[in-house]
Image (cartoon, rainbow, N blue to C red):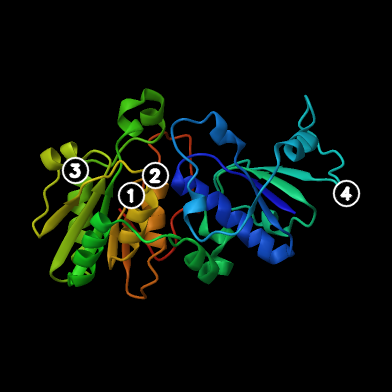
């Protein structure tokens, strides 16, 4: 079996799941998710169950058997086979991961489409909401579909601003960068309408100005962030933040003529590199 440890917000959960689904398809093994982190993790909720995903939840006793009471070592796992513990060593694509043959437990973020591009059609199918979206978001979705060239703009602030540690690692994309990105996206589309998604709408109102029609999508507090991804993916183009959430909003767009503008500097910290995060056909500024 393939077991993947799930943690973080929805964007991270999707990367982790996508790796597991890909390895499950390659190996023919069942996919199980360890979601025990959400018993004490208060920052984000587990949301993969709101999508058309296919998995089993691994029992806590099975996880304990893998790691033992004190040491993180492989020990017999119910059958006579051993479970290999695979921990991500760096934020870049490791092709050896795709060759794991034994039952394995995966720990990491796995932020590269190279882990799952081979099953893109399956991922597109499974990362769809499994319930009808809310009426409020349906209205916005209709506006997106009726616009000639809808462009999603994601502005991530939240803990990237309020948390000193997070800010030192991630930083934020500032107004001037969004202005440059907007000028770039207009090279590919006419009569652009910007649909701006942000966790800090008040900051957006004070600081972001585009010279074409702009609709601010007010964030909802119902916890259905996956519906926002669904709306982003319906756009023709995307200006994304240094956020896995908006990364998925762009990646899930299956239109052949889409354009994605991404920040060339994903991390503020100079010590962290992720060279395999941005797909080759996206534009980095």
Q: Could you tell me how far apart the alpha carbons at marks 2 and 1 are, in whole angstroms? A: 6 Å
Q: Could you tell me how far apart the alpha carbons at marks 4 and 3 are, in whole angstroms? A: 56 Å
Q: Are marks 2 and 1 in contact (CB under 8 Å)?
A: yes
Q: Quadrant of residue 269?
A: top left
Quadrant of the rendering where the N terminus is positioned = bottom right
| Residue sitting at the far right | 80
Crowding at dot 1, Cα within 10 Å, few <14 / some 14-19 / many 20+, comes out as many
Looking at this view, is 2 or 108 the one in front? Answer: 2
Q: Is residue 253 visible?
A: yes
* Disc ID at residue 263: 1
Residue with the mark numbered 4: 79
In percent of width and height, residue 49 lies at 52, 51
The tag earlier along the polypeptide, 4 or 1, is 4
Residue with the mark numbered 3: 175
Crowding at dot 2, Cα within 10 Å, few <14 / some 14-19 / many 20+, comes out as many
Q: For the point 26% across and 45% down, which residue is it?
A: 219
Residue with the mark numbered 2: 266
């Amino acid at each position: 079996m393939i077991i993947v440890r799930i943690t973080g917000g929805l964007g991270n959960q999707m990367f982790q799941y996508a790796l597991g689904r890909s390895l499950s398809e390659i190996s023919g093994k069942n996919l199980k998710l360890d979601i025990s982190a959400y018993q004490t993790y208060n920052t984000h909720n587990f949301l993969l169950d709101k999508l058309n995903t296919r998995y089993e939840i691994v029992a806590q006793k099975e996880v304990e058997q893998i790691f033992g009471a004190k040491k993180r070592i492989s020990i017999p796992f119910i059958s006579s086979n051993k479970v290999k513990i695979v921990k991500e060593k760096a934020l870049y694509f490791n092709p050896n991961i795709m060759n794991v043959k034994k039952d394995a437990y995966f720990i990491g973020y796995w932020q590269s489409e190279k882990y799952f591009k081979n099953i893109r059609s399956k991922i597109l199918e499974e990362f769809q909401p499994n319930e009808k979206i809310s009426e409020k978001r349906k209205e916005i979705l209709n506006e997106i579909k009726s616009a000639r060239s809808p462009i999603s703009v994601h502005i991530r602030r939240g803990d990237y601003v309020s948390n000193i540690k997070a800010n030192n690692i991630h930083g934020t994309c500032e107004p001037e960068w969004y202005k440059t990105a907007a000028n770039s996206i207009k090279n590919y589309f006419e009569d652009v309408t910007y649909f701006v998604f942000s966790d800090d709408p008040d900051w957006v109102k004070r600081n972001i100005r585009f010279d074409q029609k702009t609709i601010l999508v007010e964030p909802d507090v119902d916890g259905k962030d996956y519906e926002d991804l669904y709306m982003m993916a319906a756009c023709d183009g995307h200006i994304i933040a240094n956020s896995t959430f908006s990364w998925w909003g762009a990646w899930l767009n299956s239109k052949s003529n889409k354009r994605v503008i991404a920040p060339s500097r994903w991390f503020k910290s100079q010590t962290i590199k992720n060279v395999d995060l941005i797909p080759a056909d996206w534009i980095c500024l």
